Amino acid sequence: MTTALSQPLPADPATEHWRHAAVLVVDDEPGMRNFLVKTLSPRIGQVMAAASAEDAELLLQRHRFDLLILDITLPGKNGLALLRELREQGVPCEVVLITAFADLDTAIDALRAGAGDFLLKPFRVAQVLGAVRQGLDRARLKRENWVLRRSLTQRTARAAGLVGRSIVIKGLQAALQQVAAVDSTVLLTGASGTGKELAAVALHGLSRRSAAPFVPVNCAAISPSAIEAELFGQPGRDGLFVYAQGGTLFLDEVAELPMPMQGLLLRALESRRIRPMGSEQEVALDLRIVAASNKPLRPEVDAGRFRADLYYRLQVVEITLPRLAAHKEDIPDLVAHFIDTLAPVMGVDPIEISSDEMRYLQAYDWPGNVRELRNLIERSLIVGALNVSALYQSLARPAPNKPAPALVDDGITDLQTLEKRHILAVLASVDGDKTRAAGLLGISRRTLERRCAEWATA
């Protein structure tokens, strides 16, 4: 087995994504291997080579590749047999088959086995580069399609953008505009439902990385045993860091990361490199990290639940998103925007909001912030009108005969105490239904259950 490291890449926008790519050349002829490695190394981020299918299998177990250039005629296991095995194992890399002896049946077998292209030796440099370009473009499109599919369920939630004309929102927009010009790590803080992911999307859209993927991940929604593979990848499967190459990786609810994962994230931020699980090869990163937390991280650091060094590494720039109660003058714009965007998606008619109803909406304190307002509009579109009394239970407001526990104005300002009181009050207002309470609070049920368990053992 031989390895060739990358050279400086040409400044060609059409091949910009090549500098993140990895290619494996498999051919038993030393002259052909050297030719392909020499041709590709100045253009590709990483080029490796193997002289047999067996050597290639060892490399494929330890490294991730975007493209495999595979000779059909090999000593031992031939290229077609290797390709079939890789497809059965779910290895996703693109494959270009090469051979000196080909007929129509061989070409058909190659396509059926999952090859993306087929080259007949001897071939010219332009032919090789054309096949590589098409293969890497297909690999890039697969990643982008995966990101789009993953984001479909969150697209409507992000549809509001940063709607509003208040001084508060204009200040937030100005801050994001200023930070977008640099690649520094950004920490977004603020209560649940204030639109931290919306701010992250806006930040990405304003940056030089706007044409590349925006990859969101909810750290609280992935089990501790699976999160390393989800973020860093494993043999046969790329992680979210790789999918976000060139763009932005958004780590929502970053405070929920297990302590071991916090250490791995810190190393990735400092070295700008990751090592997929089970791999000996590191992958260089070219992306921006935006993290978010719905609770202040400083108390988490003091309590030993969050690494101080990771906190300072994330807090290069910190932006706090305001509660909806702080900019109620934006509620009419938000309501109009939600109606305009949700009604076509849901296939329902828009609803009219009277001036009295709008005054009621602006008088309410919105503990669930913008997310709670959006949920109200969505429910109202379903029933065809904004009927606050009919939506009392879905809004989880206390019924007249059952007041919710009120927060005692005893001068306590400790954030953890106030958070506990608020969560318990919401739980009481929905008769202990943790699923409904978690939805209103804007957190996962698992997070809510963990909070309750911590208080029970305290």
Image (cartoon, grey):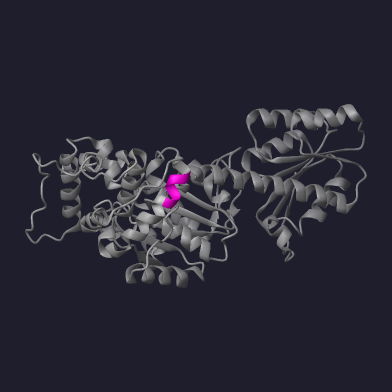
Q: Quadrant of residue 381?
A: top left
Q: Quadrant of residue 349?
A: top left
Q: Residue at x 28, y 36 (%)?
A: 435
Query: Would you say residue 342 sits in the magenta stretch?
Result: yes
Q: Position of residue 73 (x, y in %)?
A: 85, 33
In the picture as drawn, the residue positioned furthest to the left comes out as 410
Query: Would you say residue 34 sits in the magenta stretch?
Result: no
State which quarter of the image contains the N terminus. Answer: top right
Q: Position of residue 271 (x, y in %)?
A: 52, 60
* Magenta stretch secondary structure, dominant: helix
Q: Is residue 64 visible?
A: no
Q: Position of residue 355 (x, y in %)?
A: 27, 57
Closer to us: 166 or 139: 166
Q: Residue at x 90, y 51 (%)?
A: 124
Q: Is residue 122 above or below residue 270?
A: above
Closer to us: 77 or 251: 251
Q: Is residue 226 left or right of residue 131?
A: left
State which quarter of the image contains the C terminus. Answer: top left
Closer to us: 180 or 61: 180
Q: Is residue 245 visible?
A: yes
Q: For the magenta stretch, what is the residue range?
A: 340-344
Q: Position of residue 183 (x, y in %)?
A: 51, 67
Q: Total of numbered circles in the picture?
A: 0
Q: Residue at x 82, y 27 (%)?
A: 109
